[in-house]
Amino acid sequence: MTNYFELFEIPVSFHPDPAEVKKKYYELSRKYHPDRFTQATGREYTEVLQLSAKVNDAFKVLKSPDATMAYILKMNNLLQDEEKYPLSPDFLMEMMELNELAADLEPNNEPAKAQVVATLKDLLDQWEQEVSALTDKYDQDQGMGEKLLQIKDYYFRKKYLLRIKERIDKFAAHQ
């Protein structure tokens, strides 16, 4: 696994400096652009194409807070592709109630829709505050395994909340 932070020569952080990420992306894009290597041998050209693709992938990850979170968890072998993570029963009960509210939405029932949207917004805001405290602490004191496990839990909670939000948004679009 290519270390995107090393590739971009920035410290591992849940909050990489967007200006630095962008600056480094443009620098590396110019350096490894395939058009600059048209005279290279087949092997050299293939290596440049791979580096160019890694630069693009790194930029995509490092400019997205959610993707950066997933990437750091993967770097630390705490997140697997298609992982089925067991969320706490309390959280799942809360989500079941929210799902039931969302399922009971009827066309043109704006008060019910507003309640579900407000509840979801409150949960996402609460998530943001709690995870920000953890990621800030991790950025300051890297290597804190227990913080990474908590961040992983928040990562999966947010994925769950976003699926509910997507369902509500689709419902609203069909009205």
Image: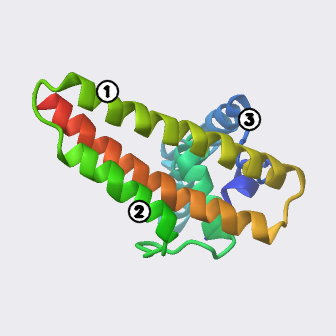
First in residue order: circle 3 vs circle 1 = 3
Residue 54 falls left or right of residue 143:
left
Q: Give the residue type at disc 1.
A: Ala
Q: Name the residue under label 1.
A: 114
* Label 1 to label 2: alpha-carbon separation: 21 Å
Pair 2/3: label in front? 2
Q: Which colour scheme is used?
A: rainbow
Find residue 162 and report its horizontal and vertical position in percent. Answer: 39, 47
Task: Kindly indicate whether the residue at mark 2 contacts the one at mark 1 (C-beta within 8 angstroms).
Answer: no
29 to 77, vertically: above or below: above
First in residue order: circle 1 vs circle 2 = 2
100 to 31, vertically: above or below: below
Q: Which residue is drawn at 55% across and 42% down?
A: 64
* Mark 3 neighbour class, 10 Å CA radius: few under 14, some 14 to 19, many 20 or more: some
Find residue 90 and report its horizontal and vertical position in percent. Answer: 50, 64
First in residue order: circle 2 vs circle 3 = 3
Pair 3/1: label in front? 1
SS at circle 2? helix
Residue 140 falls left or right of residue 113:
right
SS at circle 1? helix
Q: Which quadrant of the figure contains the N terminus?
A: bottom right
Q: Give the residue type at disc 3.
A: Asp
Q: Name the residue under label 2.
A: 93
Q: Which of 19 and 108 is in front in this view?
A: 108
Find residue 47 and report its horizontal and vertical position in percent. Answer: 55, 63
Residue 3 occupies quadrant: bottom right
Q: Give the residue type at disc 2.
A: Met
Residue 111 falls left or right of residue 14:
left
Task: Kindly indicate whether the residue at mark 3 contacts the one at mark 2 (C-beta within 8 angstroms).
Answer: no
* Mark 1 neighbour class, 10 Å CA radius: few under 14, some 14 to 19, many 20 or more: few
Q: Name the residue under label 3.
A: 17
Q: Which quadrant of the figure contains the C terminus?
A: top left
